Image (tube, grey):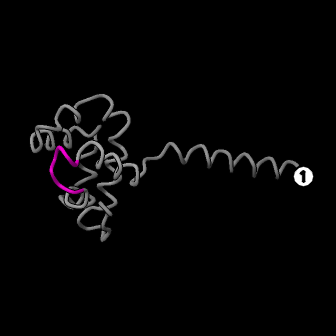
Amino acid sequence: MKKLMAMLVMAFMMVGMVSTSAFADAAKGQKYYLKFLKKTTGITGAKFATQHTQAEWKALFADGGAKFIEEYSAKYPGAAEFFKGDKFKEKYMEHIRDFAIEYASDSGNVPSC
């Protein structure tokens, strides 16, 4: 019985460790914003994130981020190519979404960028 319980505990721990890397991360989103968007948009990450509330950010990023891409491609034409690229959609968008939601105008959080 102890062996079975130990195996179950170990299995849950392994699943927990593997699955956490699959989630988006606000810290990564902040790094990606600084690396790819700060220069193009000309605004800090704090100013970017506070442009909307958490609910507004969630709505913009719903349905694959189509509304976000449309709004921010028009607002910042220099970043339009980046927003419309496959790499943004596959690798960066979920993290930038979490960054924007984490530091939205109604969150009370302030990023260090």
Q: Position of residue 17 (x, y in %)?
A: 62, 48
Q: Position of residue 14 (x, y in %)?
A: 68, 45
Splitting the image into 4 quarters, where does residue 82 fall? top left
Report the side of 49 relative to 42 (left or right): right
**Vertical arrangement, residue 111 with respect to residue 3, above or below:** below
Q: Which residue is mark 1?
A: 1
Residue found 77% across the figure and 48% down from its top: 8
Report the side of 25 relative to 10 (left or right): left
How many tags in the picture?
Answer: 1
Residue numbers of the magenta segment: 38-44
Specify the amino acid type for callout 1: Met
**Vertical arrangement, residue 56 with respect to residue 60, above or below:** below
Quadrant, the C terminus? bottom left
Residue found 30% across the figure and 28% down from its top: 86
Residue found 56% across the figure and 44% down from its top: 19
- Residue 43 among those drawn in magenta: yes
Residue furthest to the bottom: 108
Q: Position of residue 11 (x, y in %)?
A: 72, 45
Splitting the image into 4 quarters, where does residue 91 fall? top left
Q: Position of residue 67 (x, y in %)?
A: 19, 41
Q: Callout 1: helix, strand or loop?
A: loop
Report the side of 108 relative to 20 (left or right): left
39 vs 6, nearest the viewer: 39
Residue found 17% across the figure and 54% down from its top: 43
